[in-house]
């Protein structure tokens, strides 16, 4: 079965520092991969998605992720953290044959310290 | 363009009662998915409807049911509520076509079961 694993349920960085949130997937075929962000008391917002068009994917708010098949990884990065980036981040996988069904990772709570 | 609208946003029920949650997708979207979010289990897929037909179903008991109307609006129902049903229920819509479209999430309905 498709699954994703997010390493680190909590990540803390200083404002201006690099943000790195880790996601590994298990799949026998290249999947579709997504990163979503959730702010308190809100739904999920798509940051970026990988659909095999390019291995380096740029998203909103300065985030990007690189698909590495050899490492089965899809880590999310941002060069310089901003206070407004504090939120929970979810990695998700979807199979082409599963309709719109997403399987989410456990989530990573990002804290940005001033 | 209006986003995904979920009602009610908050509700409190007692064990044994039933609840109906509503979701209005983005205009033109034909797919509606439902997810349950809890601190312990994270985000779990409930079901997906596409053109009034259930296309996918997650691993939830039969107490959880849903439907979709001809205007793509969807409802989910939980009967005989249990304490463990307390959660944030998220609805997401997409165009639902064969390509990997983005899921747009509503802000959720937060259900508390006492």
Image (tube, coloured by chain):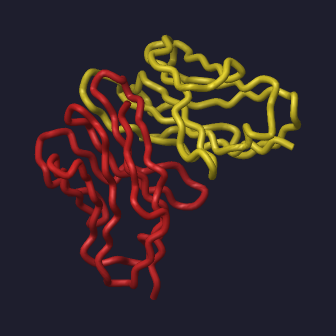
Chain colours: A red, B yellow
A106 shown above or below B6 = below
In x, y percent, where is residue B4? Answer: 51, 38
In the picture provided, is B66 more to the left or to the right than B101?
right
Q: Percent x, y for residue A78? A: 27, 70
Tell me where residue A70 appears, x and y as whole percent.
14, 49
Q: Is residue B63 above or below residue A87?
A: above
Farthest left residue in view: A54
Q: Nearer the viewer, residue A17 or B40?
A: B40
- Expressed as whole percent of the image width and height from the top left, the position of residue A48 reads 28, 51
Which image quarter holds the N terminus of chain A? top left
Is residue B31 placed above or below B36 in the rendered structure?
above
Q: Residue at x 66, y 42 (%)?
A: B109
At 86% across and 28% down in the image, what residue appears?
B17
Q: Is residue A100 left or right of residue B74?
A: left
Left-right relation of B113 to B78: right
Indicate the quadrant where residue B79 lies: top right
The residue lying toward the viewer, choosing from B50 and A31, is: A31
């Amino acid at each position: 079965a498709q699954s994703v694993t997010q390493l680190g349920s909590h990540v803390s960085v200083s404002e201006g520092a690099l943000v790195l949130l880790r996601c590994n997937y298990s799949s026998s075929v290249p999947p579709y991969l997504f990163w979503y962000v959730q702010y308190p008391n809100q739904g999920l917002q798509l940051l970026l998605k990988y659909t095999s068009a390019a291995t380096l994917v740029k998203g909103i708010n300065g985030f990007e992720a690189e698909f590495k098949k050899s490492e089965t990884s899809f880590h999310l990065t941002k060069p310089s953290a901003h206070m407004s980036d504090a939120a929970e981040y979810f990695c998700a996988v979807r199979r082409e044959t599963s309709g719109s069904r997403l399987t989410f990772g456990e989530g990573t709570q990002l804290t940005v310290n001033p | 363009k209006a986003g995904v609208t979920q009602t009610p946003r908050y509700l409190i029920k007692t064990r044994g009662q039933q609840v109906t949650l509503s979701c209005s997708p983005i205009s033109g979207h034909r797919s509606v998915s439902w997810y349950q979010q809890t601190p312990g289990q994270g985000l779990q897929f409930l079901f997906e409807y596409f053109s009034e037909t259930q296309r996918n179903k997650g691993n939830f008991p039969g107490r959880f049911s849903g439907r979709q109307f001809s205007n793509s609006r969807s409802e989910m129902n939980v009967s005989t509520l249990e304490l463990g049903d307390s959660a944030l229920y998220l609805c997401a819509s997409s165009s639902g076509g064969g390509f990997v479209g983005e899921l747009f999430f509503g802000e959720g309905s937060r259900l508390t079961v006492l």
